[in-house]
Amino acid sequence: MRTILACSCVIPLLLGVPAAAAPAHKPAPEKPVATPKALGTFDDWTAATYEQGGQTVCYAFTRAQKSTPDLPKRGQVLLTVTERPNARDSIAIEAGFAFAPKAEVKLEVGSTSLDFYTAQRNAFARDDKAAVAAFDKGSRAVAQSPGPSDKQVTDTFSLHGFSAAHAAIVKACPGK
């Protein structure tokens, strides 16, 4: 089972969020920040790598093309696949809002329905291999999730370019 740390490390890098600042009264020594290295853009998907703990982490992501209803102050909505030497094909959705505890998300790719569990602002595929197989064959993925104030939220993601982006990150981060 993947940890929340995995996604919480990747998503800020995707969004270019700076590291948390130290208190102004005593500056902390600067730590090197992992800078993503682009592998390329593949239709609607972007692939990149970064270093973490001496190991290369590879990821590909796409942003939601459509989200309903419009939620004020909602953050970016991303669908991501991550490759690590010891964790292959980790599929996550960054919702742009915090999920209620134990919320469930359904992702439809054609006639395939995939279940996701949630933790804070992220949803994780229960069966990553099935998700990758569906993404390889599909053209779009539609996520249905419980949003703030019990509003049903629908996010639509393009899968155009997924297979090429996935191949690029698998090549850049081969498994052990």
Image (spheres, helix red, strand yellow):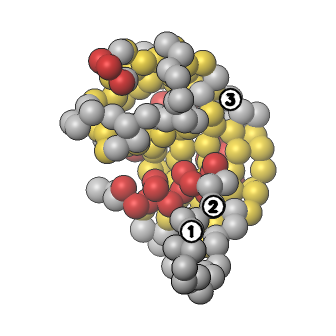
Observer-side mark, 3 or 1, equals 1
Say whether residue 52 is visible: no
Residue 120 pos. (x, y %): 34, 44
Mark 3, Cα crowd under 10 Å, few <14 / some 14-19 / many 20+, is some
Residue 109 lies, with reference to residue 92, above or below; the image says above
- Disc 3 to disc 1, C-alpha distance: 38 Å
Q: Quadrant of the N terminus?
A: bottom left
Q: Which residue is mark 2?
A: 18
Q: Nearer the viewer, residue 52 or 175?
A: 52
At label 2, the amino acid type is Pro
Question: Badge 1 is on which residue?
Answer: 21
Q: CA distance from mark 2 to mark 3?
A: 30 Å
Task: For mark 3, give the secondary structure.
Answer: loop
Q: Amino acid at mark 3?
A: His
Foreground tag (1 vs 2):
1
Residue at 29% x, 38% y: name it: 117
